[in-house]
Amino acid sequence: MVVRTRPPASRTAPAAPGGTRGRLRGRRSRAGWAKAPLHLLAITMIVPFYWMVITAFKPVSEITRNPPSFVPESPTTVGYHDPRWRPDADNPGHVAGLFQRFTEVDLGFWRFAVNSVVIATVITVLALLAASLAAYVITKHDIRGRRVIFLMILGSMMIPWQATLVPNYLVVRNLGWVDSYLGYIVPAIPKAFVVFFLVQYLRSIPDDLIEAARIDGAGEWRIWWQVVMPLLRPALAAMSIFVMLNEWNNFLWPLIIVESDQMANLPVALARLNSAFTGAQHMGVIMAASLLASLPTVVFFLLFQKHFTRGIAMSGLKG
């Protein structure tokens, strides 16, 4: 007896025209069109920064030329330091470089950069420490009225910061902190949004972890520093970018409390530079100063970009 067996049927469907490569190509095409608005938005945001960079390295003749050039044809650094400029030059229209101005201030232009670095760094560190401690107490301690305290913190976010300028200035003036680092730093330490963000993040951490540390004999300060702070690292990195950039670009409050050029930060110095030297021939100097003022923020964001994305994502999923 002969048994005939049929060949096993193929389990895979017949390949469509174009196959897998065609389907992948179609998906990539649709994804590319979906991202087109984002690409256009990115270009609109990059173009002003690019224009600032190339203008900082253009001579005056190229800056004032019409139509403008999109690439410096004769790159120069006279916007930063012009070797031909002399203080007693007979030509009053000759423009001095950025580093040749502010001779009445110690370190010249770099004095403003030092002020901005010190103020933004100290405020960021102190604001994050204070906010993390407040968030730890609100979320992990059964204190009376903690819900009311949290609602008051949320309510303070509804008040425009400009509405507190006059009371803050009166307090700072009565304390004798006008035109000082204390006047810069102390009013900027409380950050309601940072407390709110860290509270949402801490609520995702089990209370049993804190209780286990207490059972092991750890005090509250040790738990906050050695248990809570390492867990908050992604959220702190995300908030550090917000706080650092906000304080680096802060203009209104320093403008109010600064009385001497020695204590001015970069935004105030740029405003004075812009108002004192108007006109197309001074545009290269202004763009050079703007480029130096914006570079630290770009570097800071690139360094902490990964932590920033991770902190935002984890807070959104677990909050």
Image (tube, rainbow, N blue to C red):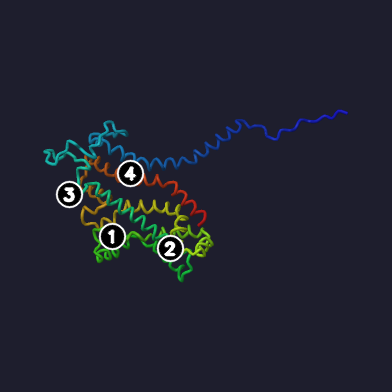
Q: Where is residue 119 in the image (x, y as percent from the top left)?
A: 30, 54
Q: Which amino acid does label 3 sit on?
A: Glu
Which tag, 1 or 4, sits closer to the chain's start?
1
The residues tagged by marks 1 and 3 sit, at their Cα atoms, a distance apart of: 23 Å
Task: Name the residue tied to disc 1.
Answer: 182
Mark number for residue 221? 2
Tag in front: 3 or 2: 2
The residues tagged by marks 1 and 4 sit, at their Cα atoms, a distance apart of: 26 Å
Name the residue nearer the viewer: 111 or 101.
111
Q: What residue type is labelled 2?
A: Trp
Tag in front: 4 or 2: 2
The residues tagged by marks 3 and 2 sit, at their Cα atoms, a distance apart of: 47 Å
Above or below 199: residue 102: above
Which tag, 4 or 2, sits closer to the chain's start?
2
Judge the density around disc 3: few (<14), some (14-19), many (≥20) Cα neighbours within 10 Å.
few
The residues tagged by marks 2 and 1 sit, at their Cα atoms, a distance apart of: 26 Å
Residue farthest right in this picture: 1
Q: What element carries label 2?
A: helix
